[in-house]
Image (spheres, coloured by chain):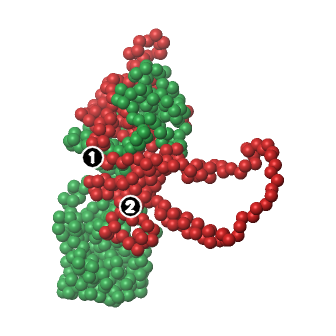
Chain colours: A red, B green
């Protein structure tokens, strides 16, 4: 199968690799008993995310059916900060005293950062077909202690305000105002690196998202979108050799 | 006589996994007269028993099944000091459960729960669902009972109040199998101890749970003729096993690879196999592909997509959602905004048939993607929650929970075939 620039499409497909390969398939020792066509779906591709809750058993999901649905979701789109509010059962194992102290009533906030991912896909089987949709990002949500932070913050502020003596008037002095041209690049102290990112993240506003629980109409409609929009075979564009090169280059 | 102290009983995993008792165990080991150290036990069986305290105590909390009395038989019921770890390949759960009720000819009867047979032979952690660790984690005392097969399982062991001697609890298995392998005691004191002697604080609690407390001190240790095989209480823990909390799973040495593989294949076929198309359909599967995948020509514009698109993201990829506009309509335009960041595997706008998934008789699964052979393996399951969420940053931002991830699948290029074939074509 020498590469022939004038080869017809079907021949190039054959060289590049089709999804039928009778030689490999016909392994008599271990015959194929079932096969599913695989479809790539892109409809939800840039919107699909995985929320991992490392501290939560999978037998207790945050859904309405379990009585513990997600109450709120906030994200900072650029920083990727994600916060999820979930209810707390205040009847069992709940320390009311502390609850009042922290002002955290019946909900707790889980927080995490969304990172983009590669190579992850969500697959569903439907009518003997496998439909894969790439995942955009994943994040791990762990209990965050923002209420403690807030509390600490408030205390700090209170302490600070005590230190400053409000009676002392601000000194008013005559200062000679001079104008000079300064390039702001070097003189102005700036954050860099992680601090800068942190500042950016803090400054960014949260975007409130409306949460639709599983088993809602919304969810069912979207789940449908996991299926590929087309059944057309996509034409492979990489030969095996090229693929090997790709892998090599990547590493 | 100094019984040989086996190295494994000293493994940190053991001792750390137990609550306090480990050291106190040894010191307050109380058989008729508690000797200060195991070393001084004069009974022939002593050394064997000498081993167990640490192991079973260590394991009682972790509840590892490895030390189930199933390994007892090798202990030698009649005064033999030899023990041989019994290497038994792990049987599938059904078999195990089925085997549970029958103590069989093994001299050491499985203690209390069916889970004890699970421990017999240190099955593999994989696929072994609720292990002791997991059970404990879930607050399920069920599995713990198995490991608590010795006098050192008593949580109040080492409690000054219990100086009269170690006692252990035999918890009724929570499964519907009922009790099996009842311990036989020849002393009448057992009955007395049931329903609590009130000497240990935990008695009340134990009673509430229907736990029988049997004071080992009152139990004749003579063994043999009396029908008490001390081997039961001091099961041997194999030194090669490695215990650590892993969501309840125990990582263990692979005993028999082919058996293991066969079982995995079974399980895997279960994922994609014949047991009900419906089962397959209602679930969300998480597929992990290599970041670099064979590309496809876009079926819409016929434009050959850039190869070698930089995929520097990797794990340390930029955070952020890079808000996209609202969800594309089904016939949607190709978001060629494919920011230079889009990886090959997530090029938007590509819909269509890209490959085939094959399941073979042995359970081996493979995928052919764009003509390239890939191997498919089952990914590690997790016990924590993983949700699939669709986030839409449109004007009206909303997020929708589609569901939980049911199973994880890892797909990697079949290098053998990949390189094998390319050589041929040259």
Estimate the x, y position of residue B183 in percent, counting from the top left: 21, 75
Mark 1 or 2, closer to the camera: 2
Residue depicted at 19% across the width and 73% down the height: B182
Q: Which residue is mark 1?
A: A215
Tell me the element at label 2. Answer: strand
- Image vertical order of residue B244 relative to residue A64, above or below: below
Few, some or many residues within 10 Å of mark 2 (<14, 14–19, 20+)? some
Farthest residue in the top direction? A6
Estimate the x, y position of residue A110 in percent, counting from the top left: 43, 57
Identify which residue, B139 or A213, lies in the foreground: A213
Estimate the x, y position of residue B217 in percent, counting from the top left: 29, 85
| Quadrant that contains the C terminus of chain A | top right
Tell me the element at label 1. Answer: loop
| Quadrant that contains the N terminus of chain A | top left
In this rendering, position of residue A191 left or right of residue B173: right
The reply to the same-chain question for discs 1 and 2 is yes
Q: Which residue is mark 2?
A: A107
Q: Chain of mark 1?
A: A
Few, some or many residues within 10 Å of mark 1 (<14, 14–19, 20+)? some
Estimate the x, y position of residue A147 in percent, counting from the top left: 47, 63
């Amino acid at each position: 199968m020498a590469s022939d620039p004038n080869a017809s499409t079907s021949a190039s497909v054959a060289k590049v690799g089709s999804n039928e390969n009778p030689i490999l398939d016909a392994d008599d020792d271990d015959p194929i008993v079932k096969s599913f066509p695989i479809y790539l779906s892109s409809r939800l591709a840039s919107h699909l995310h995985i929320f991992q809750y490392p501290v939560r058993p999978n037998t207790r999901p945050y859904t309405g059916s379990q009585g513990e649905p997600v109450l709120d979701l906030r994200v900072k789109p650029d920083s990727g900060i994600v916060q999820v509010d979930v209810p707390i059962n205040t009847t069992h194992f709940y320390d009311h005293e502390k609850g009042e102290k922290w002002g955290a009533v019946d909900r707790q906030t889980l927080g995490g950062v969304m990172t983009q991912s590669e190579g992850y896909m969500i697959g569903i089987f439907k009518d003997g077909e496998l439909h894969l949709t790439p995942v955009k990002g994943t994040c791990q949500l762990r209990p965050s202690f923002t209420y403690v932070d807030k509390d600490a913050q408030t205390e700090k502020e209170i302490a600070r305000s005590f230190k400053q003596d409000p009676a002392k008037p601000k000194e008013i002095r005559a200062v000679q105002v001079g104008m000079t041209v300064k390039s702001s690049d070097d003189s102005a102290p700036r954050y860099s690196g992680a601090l800068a990112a942190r500042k950016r993240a803090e400054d960014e506003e949260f975007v409130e998202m409306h949460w639709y629980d599983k088993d809602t109409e919304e969810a069912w409609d979207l789940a449908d979108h996991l299926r590929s929009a087309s059944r057309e075979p996509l034409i492979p564009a990489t030969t095996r050799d090229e693929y090997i090169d790709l892998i090599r280059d990547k590493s | 006589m100094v019984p040989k102290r086996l190295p494994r009983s000293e493994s940190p995993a053991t001792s750390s996994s137990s609550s306090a008792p480990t050291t106190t165990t040894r010191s307050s080991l109380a058989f008729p007269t508690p000797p200060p150290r195991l070393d001084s036990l004069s009974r022939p069986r002593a050394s064997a028993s000498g081993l167990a305290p640490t192991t079973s105590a260590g394991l009682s909390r972790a509840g590892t099944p490895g030390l189930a009395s199933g390994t007892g038989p090798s202990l030698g019921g009649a005064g033999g000091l030899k023990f041989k770890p019994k290497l038994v390949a792990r049987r599938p759960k059904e078999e195990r459960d089925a085997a549970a009720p029958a103590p069989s000819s093994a001299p050491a009867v499985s203690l209390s729960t069916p889970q004890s047979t699970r421990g017999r032979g240190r099955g593999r952690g994989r696929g072994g669902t609720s292990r002791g660790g997991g059970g404990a984690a879930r607050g399920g005392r069920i599995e713990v009972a198995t490991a608590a097969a010795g006098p050192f399982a008593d949580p109040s062991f080492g409690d000054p109040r219990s100086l009269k001697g170690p006692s252990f609890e035999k918890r009724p298995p929570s499964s519907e199998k009922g009790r099996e392998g009842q311990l036989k005691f020849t002393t009448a004191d057992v009955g007395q101890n049931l329903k609590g002697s009130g000497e240990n604080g935990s008695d009340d609690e134990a009673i509430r749970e229907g736990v029988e407390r049997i004071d080992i001190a009152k139990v004749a240790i003579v063994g043999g003729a009396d029908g008490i095989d001390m081997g039961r209480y001091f099961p041997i823990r194999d030194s090669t096993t490695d215990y650590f909390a892993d969501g309840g799973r125990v990582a263990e040495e692979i005993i028999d690879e082919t058996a293991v593989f066969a079982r995995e294949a079974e399980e895997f076929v279960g994922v994609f196999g014949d047991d009900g198309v419906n089962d397959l359909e209602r679930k969300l599967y998480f597929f992990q592909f290599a970041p670099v995948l064979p590309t496809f020509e876009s079926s819409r514009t016929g434009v050959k997509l850039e190869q070698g698109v930089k995929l520097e993201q990797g794990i340390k990829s930029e955070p952020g959602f890079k808000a996209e506009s609202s969800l594309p309509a089904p016939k949607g335009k190709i978001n060629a905004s494919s920011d230079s960041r889009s990886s090959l595997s997530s090029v938007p706008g590509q819909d269509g048939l890209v490959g085939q998934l094959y399941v073979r008789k042995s359970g081996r699964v493979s995928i052919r993607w764009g003509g390239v052979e890939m191997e498919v393996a089952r990914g590690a399951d997790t016990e924590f929650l993983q949700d699939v969420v669709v986030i839409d940053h449109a004007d009206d931002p909303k997020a929708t929970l589609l569901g939980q991830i049911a199973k994880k699948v890892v797909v990697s290029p079949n290098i053998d075939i990949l390189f094998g074939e390319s050589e041929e074509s040259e």
